[in-house]
Amino acid sequence: MAANEVQVVHIGDLLSRAQGKVLELGPGGGDQMYHYKPEQIEKLYAAEPNAFLHKTLVEAAEKKSLGGKIVVLDAGAEPGSLLPALKKAELIPSTSSTLPEEGLFDTIVAVKSLCSAPQSQLTAAVAIFQALLRPGGEFLFFEHVDNSTDSITMAYAWLVDWLWPVFMGGCRLDGKLDKVVLGMGGWDERQISTVGDFKGHEVFRYIKGVCRKA
């Protein structure tokens, strides 16, 4: 799932906006970390569920002048995984049943990771992301979602999706992040666009999004 030349430009544009206290969801081995501007980052919390990638992730941070700022969380994006990890990191009191009203993060980032989160939990997950943002904080994402432009592509994606997740770490072709974000309130601004290399018939439709919390 390496980024092509067109995608790199969009991912770079998004991650260069990240500032303050940042939560990145599913950073993998830190392949996209070079897009961050270290001088803008106060702390980078990296929620990565694959523990074998944690060492590589820390090494990537050190190479990009973020070594002293990264905190790796053994967690996925779904609430049942992310929230316990935030408590373990003492960002949320262990005895608390609610999230801090003032939020925790200035920026939350997802790049090609939410397709692997359980889609049945996506709405709840995005609501948690919004709650974790401070007022004025931004949710930045570059993800692929379902392509509903024509019936043939939709049918092909439906067939492929029976086997695709098995071989691609749970990645789904029927992502609905754009619909989830557009269907919820609480955003002061929402900018979601289909990436320019999309021709209309591909199984993967990539979107770029910037959502600012009210």
Image: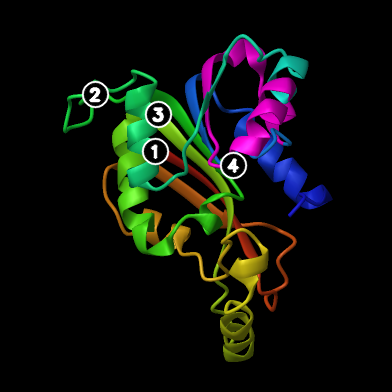
> Do callouts 1 and 3 mark residues in contact (Cβ within 8 Å)?
no
Say few, some or many: other residues with alpha carbon within 10 Å of mark 2 (under 14 / 14 to 19 / 20 or more): few
Secondary structure type for disc 4: loop
Q: Is residue 102 left or right of residue 67?
A: left
Foreground pick, 72 / 9? 72
Say few, some or many: other residues with alpha carbon within 10 Å of mark 1 (under 14 / 14 to 19 / 20 or more): many
Residue drawn at point x = 55 percent, y = 66 percent: 172
Q: Which residue is mark 4?
A: 50
The dot on residue 65 is none
Q: Is residue 48 part of the magenta span, yes or no?
A: yes
Q: Is residue 50 part of the magenta span, yes or no?
A: yes
Secondary structure type for disc 2: loop
Residue drawn at point x = 71 percent, y = 12 percent: 65
Give how far across and how far down residue 7 sits, in percent: 74, 49
Give how far across and how far down residue 182 sits, in percent: 37, 57
Secondary structure type for disc 3: strand
Lower position in the chain sequence, tag 3 or tag 4 = 4
Q: Which residue is mark 3?
A: 137
**Could you give the CA–CA distance between mark 3 and mark 4, rounded to whole angstroms?**
27 Å
Q: Which residue is mark 2?
A: 94
**Residue type, numbered disc 1:** Leu
